[in-house]
Image: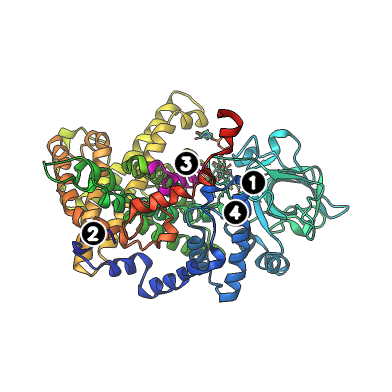
Amino acid sequence: MNPDIVKERQNASFDVQKLTYILDGGPEKTKRRREISLVLNDPDFDEEDPNFLSRSERYEQAVRKSAQMILKLREYGISDPAEINCYKSVVRGNFHESLGLHYVMFLPTLYSQCDQEQSKKWLPLATSFEVLGTYAQTELGHTHLRGLETTATFDPTTQEFVLNSPTVTSIKWWPGAGKTSNHAVVLAQLYTRGKCHGLHAFIVQLRHMDTHEPLPILVGDIGPKFGFSEVDNGFLKLDHVRIPRENMLMKHVEPDGRYVKPASAKLTYGTMVFIRSLLVGLSALVMAKSCTIAIRYSAVRHQSEIRSEPEPQILDYQTQQYKLFPLLATAYAFSFVGQYMTETYYRISGDINQGDLSELPELHAVSAGLKAFTTWTTNTGIEVCRMSCGGHGYSRSSALPDLYAEFTPTCTYEGENTVMMLQTAYLVKSYRQAKAGEQLRGIMSYLNDMEQRHVRAHPASARPALVDINDLSDLVESYKLRAALVESAAKSIQQELQKRRSHEDAWNNSAIDLVKASDAHCHYMVVKLFTDKLSEIGDPDINLVLTTLAQLYALHGIALNSGDFLQAGLLTVPQMQQIPVRIKELLCLIRPNAVALVDAFDFPDKVLSSVLGRYDGNVYENLFEWARRSPLNATEVHESFHKYLK
Ligand SMILES: CC/C=C\C/C=C\C/C=C\CCCC(=O)SCCNC(=O)CCNC(=O)[C@H](O)C(C)(C)COP(=O)(O)OP(=O)(O)OC[C@H]1O[C@@H](n2cnc3c(N)ncnc32)[C@H](O)[C@@H]1OP(=O)(O)O
Ligand SMILES: Cc1cc2nc3c(=O)[nH]c(=O)nc-3n(C[C@H](O)[C@H](O)[C@H](O)COP(=O)(O)OP(=O)(O)OC[C@H]3O[C@@H](n4cnc5c(N)ncnc54)[C@H](O)[C@@H]3O)c2cc1C
């Protein structure tokens, strides 16, 4: 064990194990997660570092691993979805799996959109992996749902739907698993009795069940990407492909071609809401991994000098702390927000299953906003962690380049982030309702205060600044008032409308304000949820260290967005000047606990797959050992010497 890292752990002021329990949701859950993690010792999962393999080898290794996982899950009798998730995330490490779409999109779509008869037919096939599915929605030319071109036309004479990609732009593009899957949920515009009824989901067989040869359908892999090398993101061109009427999910078309309207057309989009909710937790996980790597490495890396003494640990540099500790605070904040998002998703989707759709718009708005907010922040954060590890951070052995490449598409898939932020129509709507005197419920209820509390932009001089920057509840209140930026967005739309612009143009001309408002709303939610969580934590040592992190998260966010807080008169200039001073104090308070705080995330070394983030801190000898395994070192003299240099 590296002596620096040993010393760091001795300095901790709290019980790391107890904090792990809080993050997992209780000691029982930690125990079970650790039991599941023992799978890492299974020699059947031994594999070559994917960084040393070609794309095709990576795909093959990933398929083998996916197949092994299925067999092992059966062998160990793991069937609880949360446990399956935990198992898979341990085995997957930092990469994705070829069967990912089957688990995260195909199966959930079947679960939520099959009727009884369909469930009976498809669920056994899909859960036994005879049917391997993907989710084919996006097209070469469009992702915007109303713009999708693929059609499904009902033919009552044969009781079939005819699926067609009429143009190049209508070819399905990006559905994961172009080579792996034999079925797809295809999203297509439904036509019956000559009328279009919008987007609906259909189960389409793509490949022969025995030979895996494609049916008369063009299907394949779209080629190498920035990351996702384990995944065969695919293309799919359907040329008048016929499927039985029973393959339409939720069966909205009667045998005579009559269309039966669903309770809400948006229920077809349910799987996207599900994944967006999950991505909040994924952001927390990846931010936690990145911080673990960068902070452990910073504790063992010595460089340069502060005083004329031996070289200090780079973690002692104030600038290094300023790079990493706000991200550490963010990882904790997002962990608690992820827990909230999961609970909220299951609560509201439970109500939806019972026929109560009243909270669907809020679930959509919150999951879209938090997905965008947390993935954007994490995306930037991973890169800061990589840079903070200097040259060794650039090596694939650090895992940080892979974490970035695998995570960055979360800002794009499942709804491009700006587009998701623009789903703030709900915010503006809520604002208008609150202004009209309606009492809002749930997370939007802060807008009820609008009129009474005059929550709106004021010049600094007009508002007495009562904020104590050391008091978290005051900071939460300031974020809440800043979230009233939605008022500026609503006003901008109003002004545009007064200029006789159409509603659509008024919206587009206010889009920057709308995204800002959405961002401010999400930021408020994160600060509030982090602060609320503190009241549940009884252990005084842990409460203290997490309070320090929450303060840092809140103050750092204000420092980055000082213009908003000053403009709205929420803080005065002298208070603003105090914030960097307080931030520096908080960095000093966090410093002795930094390694313990990342240890509490409890990532086994094999899951981190990072030479820099090793628990034992023995970085250099392992870096050397990793480099020696590079395929270029397989021979002492590379063949290119004989071919070209000699
Ligand atoms: C843990 C998981 C880990 C890792 C994952 C691993 C592997 C997976 C890897 C990759 C998977 C990627 C899969 C995909 O990307 S699938 C494709 C995803 N595509 C999108 O997300 C498309 C994004 N676009 C949209 O969702 C829509 O186009 C839109 C932007 C939302 C606009 O919708 P639209 O209906 O066309 O038009 P509007 O007029 O704007 O909306 C009408 C109305 O409906 C409301 N609305 C929209 N969406 C929803 C919804 N999902 N639920 C509820 N309500 C919705 C909208 O707010 C508006 O409401 P009004 O009241 O204003 O009418
Ligand atoms: C790794 C990966 C896996 C994927 N897996 C799947 C899958 O399995 N199945 C599937 O169906 N799809 C999948 N996708 C597709 C994914 O869902 C889309 O790429 C995503 O929804 C974004 O759409 P787009 O690529 O068309 O971007 P565009 O919408 O073209 O975005 C390009 C730019 O235009 C801007 N823009 C677009 N519309 C607006 C607007 N209304 N207002 C303001 N700005 C706007 C965006 O902000 C962005 O800056 C995957 C994508 C990736 C990268």
Q: What residue lies at 38% left-to-right and 45% top-to-bottom?
A: 382
Q: Which residue is mark 2?
A: 3
Where residue 527 appears, x then y in whole percent?
29, 51
**Image depth: mark 2 or mark 1 in front:** 2
The front one of 432 and 306 is 306
Magenta range: 393-412
Spatial separation of the CA atoms under disc 1 and disc 4 = 19 Å
> In the rendered structure, which disc, 1 or 4, sits on the residue that comes first in sequence?
1
Q: Are marks 1 and 4 in contact (CB under 8 Å)?
A: no
Q: Residue furthest right?
A: 157
* Mark 3 CB near ligand 2 (8 Å cut): yes
Of badges 3 and 2, the one in the foreground is: 2
The residue beneath circle 4 is: 264
The mark nearer the N terminus, 4 or 2, is 2
Label 3 environment density (alpha carbons within 10 Å; few <14, some 14–19, many ≥20): many
Residue 65, label in figure: none
Which amino acid type corresponds to the residue marked 4 in the rendered image?
Ser
Please report whichever mark, 3 or 2, sits nearer to the chain's N-terminal start. 2
Q: CA distance from mark 3 to mark 2?
A: 43 Å
Cβ–Cβ below 8 Å for labels 4 and 2?
no
For residue 137, the mark is: 1
Quadrant position of the N terminus in the picture: bottom left
Which residue in the structure is indicated by mark 3?
417
Mark 1 is surrounded, within 10 Å at the Cα level, by few (under 14), some (14 to 19) or many (20 or more) other residues, namely many
Q: What type is the residue that disc 1 sits on? A: Gln
Nearer-the-camera pick, 101 or 62:
62
Q: Is residue 73 above or below residue 187?
A: below
Residue furthest to the top: 499
Residue 467: give x, y in percent of width and height: 16, 46
Quadrant of the drawing holding the C terminus = top right
